[in-house]
Image: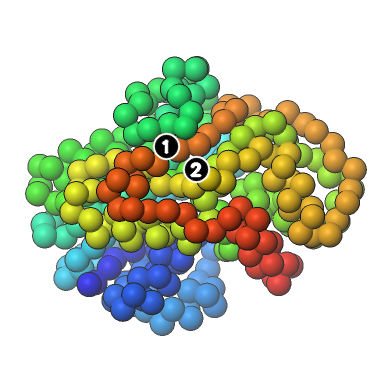
Amino acid sequence: MKHLLLGGAGFIGLHLARRLLADGHDVTVVDDFSRGRRDPELDALDVPVISADLTDPASFAALPRDCDQVHLLAAVVGVRNVERDPARVVRINTLVVLNTLDWITAPQRLFFASTSETYAGGVSMGVVPVPTPETVPLVVEDVTAPRFAYAVSKMLGEAAVVHAGRAKGVPVVVGRFHNVYGPRMGADHVIPELSLRALRREDPFVVYGIDQHRAFCYVDDAVEAVVRLTGTDAAAGRIVHIGDDTAETNIGELAELVLRIAGHAPVVEKEPAPQGSVARRCPDLTLLRDLTGYAPRTSLDEGVRRTFDWYRARS
């Protein structure tokens, strides 16, 4: 099969590209490189790479029409980016989705990368259970809060993808990623941030939101879920949670794990979690398992160790 990865130079995109190539597929990567230049790991894939601003409809003229599966991963992500310029997040994430839906045609298939942030407001308000299934209502707790700009953009994306897919006869799958981590994900997420600070031997070592709970999913397992969902006809038209419900931990325990791997024993200082961050997040993966037989394989200990080793080799 021929796969087109929109936003394919990013964190999940590069890992997905590697997996698809290993499975014998053809891969083309499209990215605007707004988060940095091409790097050796991308170049090592030895695949066609197209630089394009997907907020411009004209950019789609350069994309190959003969692809079988389109993966829409392109988006502005990260709490710092959202808080710095929420209007940019809404504009870019929305235009990329709408332009892709105008361009795509059957029999092409589409996977859209969404997020657990779509229902985070409901968790904070106590109206959504944890572990969380796909059937819960999507709630915006405070539309004026910058943090919700990302969630709103993904809510719109989910609705647009599902309804346009139905109208155009394009099989679509929406995957809501839950705390995916691993090598090459940047420095602004909790596991890389803790790893880099441990490598710098910070002491005292500040940990924010020490009692918050998250279910972390190693990137290889998330990619496995994407591969299975896009190869399953029964998943067409569905919104499906992607994560690892066996790796739930609190941030304090996560920090202890990182520090143990790093061989660092500082004084730990506890600070409150960032405003707007939910107290607990864990997916209900019943639907994903029923559709695909998915089971995560990478323990939290092993995944954090691989991630730490990657950052240590490049620090």
Asked if 111 appears above or below 120 in the picture, the reply is below
Identity of the residue drawn at 11% across and 60% down: 107
The x and y percentages for residue 234 are 19, 49
Q: Is residue 187 visible?
A: no
Give the residue at mark 2: 245
Asked if 32 appears above or below 153 in the picture, the reply is below
Q: Quadrant of the C terminus?
A: bottom right
Nearer-the-camera pick, 121 or 241: 241
| 3D distance between C-alphas at marks 2 and 1 | 7 Å
Q: Amino acid at mark 2?
A: Asp
Q: Which mark is residue 284?
A: 1
Q: How many marks?
A: 2
The x and y percentages for residue 251 are 68, 39
* SS for dot 1: loop
**Pointer 2 and pointer 1: residues touching (CB < 8 Å)?**
yes
Nearer-the-camera pick, 277 or 294: 294
Residue 103 lies left or right of residue 169; in this view the side is right
Q: Is residue 298 visible?
A: yes
